[in-house]
Amino acid sequence: MTIAAARNTARRAVARAMRLRPANKLEAEAANETSARRLFGSLAGLRGLEPAGAALGATRTANPTSNWLASLGVRSACAANYSSVTVSVPEMGDSITEGSIATIEKSAGDAVAEDEVIVQVETDKVTIDIRSPGAGVVQEILVAEEDTVVVGQPVAKVELGAAGAEAPKAEEPAAPAAPAPAAEDPAAQAAAPPPPPPQAPKAAAKPAAAKPAAPKAPSTTTIAPASQGKRERRVPMTRMRKRISERLKGAQNTYAMLSTFNEIDMTNLMELRKKYKDTFMEEHGVKLGFMSAFVKASADALQKVPAVNAVIDGDDIIYKDYVDISVAVASPKGLVVPVLRDAHNLSFAGVEKSIAALGQKARDGTISIDDMAGGTFTITNGGVFGSLLSTPIINAPQSAILGMHATNMRPVVVDGKIEARPMMYVALTYDHRLIDGREAVTFLKRIKEVVEDPARIVLDI
């Protein structure tokens, strides 16, 4: 057989091996290399092929697969089935340009499914998941936790099409070679207990950190610091917590905040819920709660007292002719405030469905910037945590916020008689620069009237 004939035979054999289309890239590479090695091994004895065989052995060390196939003049067909893509920070909203890396869910070499989270970016308002555009293997992570990243910045590289395969990981420094242990009987090895792990030498006890000197009392007696001997932990604030802190302090410094209070008899609303909750659940697939009644009552009151739905902009007042109500929701990462769009046009069922969907997204960490953008008025319910009374802080740049609280049985006078009724305190915190006391009291009284007599919503009275 001539050298040319041998090469043609090798090319045909490799082409057949590649047409088998193994399950993943590594299997394809292995099949190609095995086929080539067998052919060259069988042909190495032919006169004139020894130099080719030696050269092939030398190239294998540098690049085990591509160089073998290159020596045959055959390009690996499987390489066309894989592509490397760069995963970057997506758009995060009009006002969000940067964030910090909260968590890194994948490492180089990990298999990743389509739409699986690789990195989480924490912004001022929400945590955003950066997901893989397709199934494959993570080639490289380009960021570290707590790094600050901007929109469009690459965070990872993924080799698509290699689903289920594990990419080779970065080489680690080789440990010094230990002498090979003498061969032992397998039965003796099984019976022998494992040697105890080596114990690291105990570090010398560090002296306690110096405490700042306590101020001296008027007498000559020195008082020891109260924290002496007690443990403390210092952890950095998350970006979201810092932003919440800044916004709340900014609201306190900007607004002339004042709170007014009232109490609501929840008897009629609770009876309405008790009577229709099962039918409501069967009809709409969501539970009937109290929040929908307060949203509808607030939407009605905002239309009747438009100053509460307005904002100050410089020397102007902007009156909003629509009602977008923000509902405060506690999430594992902090307080988020998704918005119910056009709440005045929503039914009870529409309100409950929207609240349930947004609340689930907040708890799952999938809520977006768009879900929280805007809002003309906010409702917060501290009653779910047992709060009896509070003065909530305005959610800037809005001008007012309604605080709901726990419902408790209290003695009240009804038709000249003392009765135990389920009562809830409500609080309205408002910007006194824009909203007068008369308007604030009128607004809160309207909410009381509607919640105590839900038929008013239906009859529009």
Image (cartoon, rainbow, N blue to C red):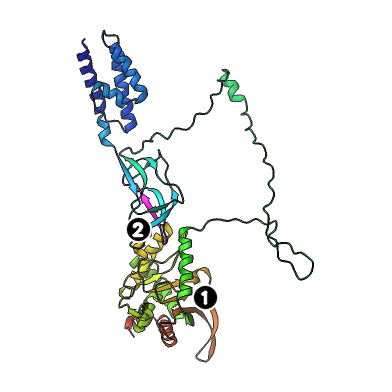
State the image coordinates of residue 196 (x, y, percent, origin top left): 64, 31
Segment tinted magenta in the rendering: 123-133
Circle on res. 390: 1
Q: Quadrant of residue 322?
A: bottom left
Q: Is residue 119 left or right of residue 11?
A: right
Residue 460 falls in which quadrant of the image? bottom left
* Whole-percent x, y for residue 291 in the image: 42, 72
Please say if 44 is above or below 147: above
Residue at (34% x, 49% y) in the render: 88
Can residue 155 be seen here? The reply is: yes
The front one of 269 and 33 is 33
Q: Quadrant of the C terminus?
A: bottom left
Q: Amino acid at mark 1?
A: Ser
Quadrant of the drawing holding the N terminus: top left
Q: Position of residue 385 (x, y in %)?
A: 52, 68
The residue tagged with tag 2: helix, strand or loop?
loop
Residue marked by disc 2: 92
**Residue 230's spot in the image, x, y percent?**
67, 57
Would you say residue 116 sits in the magenta stretch?
no
